[in-house]
C-alpha cells in the first residue's frame, strides 16, 4: 500500500513532518521568491486533497504544477496511516486542526461535487495550520496601516473621507446607504441612489454594503444586486493589530486587490476587496477567510457594513487606507 509521505518526499525532497500527514518542505519554486524564504514558509499536506502551500506569491505557477503532479500520483492510491493514539487515517480523510478525523465519506456526503468540497475542507485546514506563519510573515498593525496608506485619508474631514471612499465605485452604479432597517418598503427607495447623487448628498447614515443594486430598488437583498461587488472582510476574533495580517496576506500573497480599509469606530477594521469573479474562487476564499478567524456573516453581499464618514456613538467611522 502506498505511503503518501514517500511520494511527497520524492517530489519535494526532505520534509520536516509535523504530523503523520503534514510537514514543512522546501518550496519547488524557491528560486523565484522575491523575498527571503523562511524555513516554515512552505508546507505539504497529504490528507484530504494533497496540497503544497507556500506563503510567497512569485512561485505560484510552479507550486500549482507540482500540486497537480502530487494529486495525480496520490489521487488513485489507497493508503492508511496509523496515528500515535492508535487511530487510522485513510486516503481522502482530513486530519482537522483540532485533531479530529473528518472521514472521506462525510466530505463526499456534504456536496454532490466531492472533489470541490474536499478541496474546500482541505483549504480551511491548511489555513488553520498556517495561521501562525501568516500572522508573523504578513504582520501589519493598525499604526502601520495608517502610515502605509497610498492616499493619506485618515485625517481628512468626514465628508471628504466619504467622497474618497465613493471613488472605489464605478460612477454609474446604484449604492445603498442607510440604517440597518432602511430596506424593504417603497419609501426606502431614497436609500438607493447613483454614486453622483451620493457625492452631492454626503454621508446620511451609518451603513452601506459591498454591492451595487438595480436602479429603482427599495429592498437590500441578494436578488436586487446588480453587477459590482466587494468582499468586505472583518474579524470579531482578531484585534485591529492582528487582522491587518489577513488583509496583507490577501492583497500580497493571494493578489486579491484591496481597495480600502475602514476603522469602524469599534473594535474592528473592515477591508474592502474586489470580489472574486468566479463562484469557485469565491467559495475557496470564503473557506480560507473563515478558517483564519474572519466573520462569514459579512460574506453575504447585501450585509450592512460600516460607512466611512459617519459617526458611531460620537466616534468617526474613518477611512484609514485607500488605494489610489
Image (cartoon, rainbow, N blue to C red):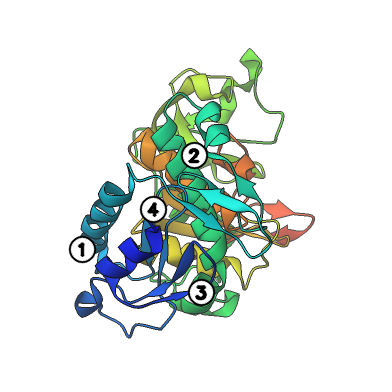
Residue at 24%, 59% in the rendered image: 66
Mark 3 sits on what residue? 133
Counting other residues with Cα less than 10 Å from the Cα at mark 2, is it few (<14), some (14-19), or many (20 or more)? many
Give the image quarter of residue 65.
bottom left
Give the SS element for disc 4. loop
Residue at 47%, 53% in the rendered image: 47
Q: Earlier in the sequence, mark 3 or mark 4?
A: 4
- Answer above or below: position of 54 versus 288: below
Does residue 83 appear to the left or right of 74 in the view shown? right
Checking the image for residue 62, the label placed there is 1
Of discs 2 and 3, which sits in the foreground?
Answer: 3
User: In the image, residue 17 lies at what x, y percent?
Assistant: 48, 73
Give the image quarter of residue 184.
top right
Checking the image for residue 198, the label placed there is 2
Q: Which of marks 2 and 1 is nearer the N terminus?
A: 1
Residue at 51%, 56% in the rendered image: 81
User: In the image, residue 238 lies at what x, y percent?
Assistant: 66, 64
Q: Which of marks 2 and 4 is nearer the N terminus?
A: 4
Does the rendering let one see residue 34? yes
Nearest to the observer: residue 64 or residue 159: 64
Of discs 2 and 4, which sits in the foreground?
Answer: 4
- Answer above or below: position of 98 versus 16: above
Checking the image for residue 50, the label placed there is 4
Does residue 236 appear to the left or right of 278 in the view shown? right
Checking the image for residue 45, the label placed there is none
Q: Which of marks 1 and 4 is nearer the N terminus?
A: 4
Q: Earlier in the sequence, mark 3 or mark 1?
A: 1
Give the SS element for disc 2. helix
Amino acid at each position: 500500500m502506498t505511503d503518501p509521505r514517500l511520494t511527497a518526499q520524492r517530489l519535494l525532497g526532505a520534509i520536516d513532518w509535523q504530523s503523520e500527514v503534514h510537514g514543512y518542505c522546501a518550496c519547488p519554486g524557491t528560486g523565484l521568491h522575491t523575498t527571503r524564504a523562511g524555513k516554515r514558509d512552505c508546507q505539504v499536506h497529504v490528507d484530504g486533497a494533497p496540497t503544497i502551500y507556500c506563503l510567497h506569491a512569485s512561485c505560484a505557477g510552479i507550486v500549482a504544477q507540482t500540486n497537480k503532479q502530487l494529486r495525480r500520483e496520490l489521487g488513485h492510491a489507497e493508503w492508511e496511516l496509523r496515528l500515535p493514539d492508535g487511530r487510522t487515517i485513510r486516503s481522502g480523510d482530513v486530519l482537522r486542526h483540532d485533531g479530529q478525523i473528518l472521514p472521506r465519506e462525510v466530505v463526499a456526503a456534504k456536496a454532490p461535487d466531492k472533489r470541490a468540497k474536499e478541496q474546500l475542507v482541505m483549504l480551511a485546514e491548511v489555513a488553520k495550520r498556517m495561521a501562525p506563519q501568516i500572522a508573523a510573515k504578513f504582520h501589519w498593525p493598525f499604526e502601520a496601516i495608517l502610515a502605509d496608506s497610498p492616499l493619506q485619508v485618515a485625517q481628512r474631514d468626514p465628508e471628504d473621507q466619504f467622497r474618497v471612499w465613493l471613488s472605489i465605485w464605478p460612477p454609474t452604479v446604484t449604492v445603498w446607504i442607510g440604517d440597518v432597517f432602511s430596506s424593504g418598503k417603497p419609501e426606502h427607495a431614497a436609500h438607493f441612489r447613483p454614486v453622483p447623487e451620493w457625492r452631492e448628498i454626503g454621508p446620511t447614515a451609518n451603513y452601506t454594503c459591498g454591492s451595487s443594486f438595480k436602479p429603482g430598488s427599495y429592498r437590500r437583498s441578494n436578488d436586487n444586486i446588480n453587477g459590482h461587488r466587494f468582499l468586505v472582510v472583518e474579524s470579531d476574533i482578531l484585534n485591529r493589530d492582528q487582522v491587518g495580517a489577513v488583509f496583507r496576506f490577501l492583497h500580497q500573497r493571494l493578489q486579491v486587490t484591496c481597495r480600502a480599509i475602514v476603522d469602524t469606530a469599534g473594535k474592528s477594521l473592515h477591508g474592502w476587496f474586489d470580489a472574486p469573479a468566479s463562484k469557485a474562487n469565491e467559495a475557496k476564499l470564503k473557506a480560507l477567510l473563515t478558517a483564519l478567524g474572519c466573520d462569514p456573516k459579512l460574506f453575504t453581499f447585501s450585509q450592512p457594513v460600516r460607512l466611512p464618514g459617519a459617526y458611531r456613538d460620537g466616534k468617526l467611522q474613518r477611512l484609514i487606507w485607500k488605494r489610489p
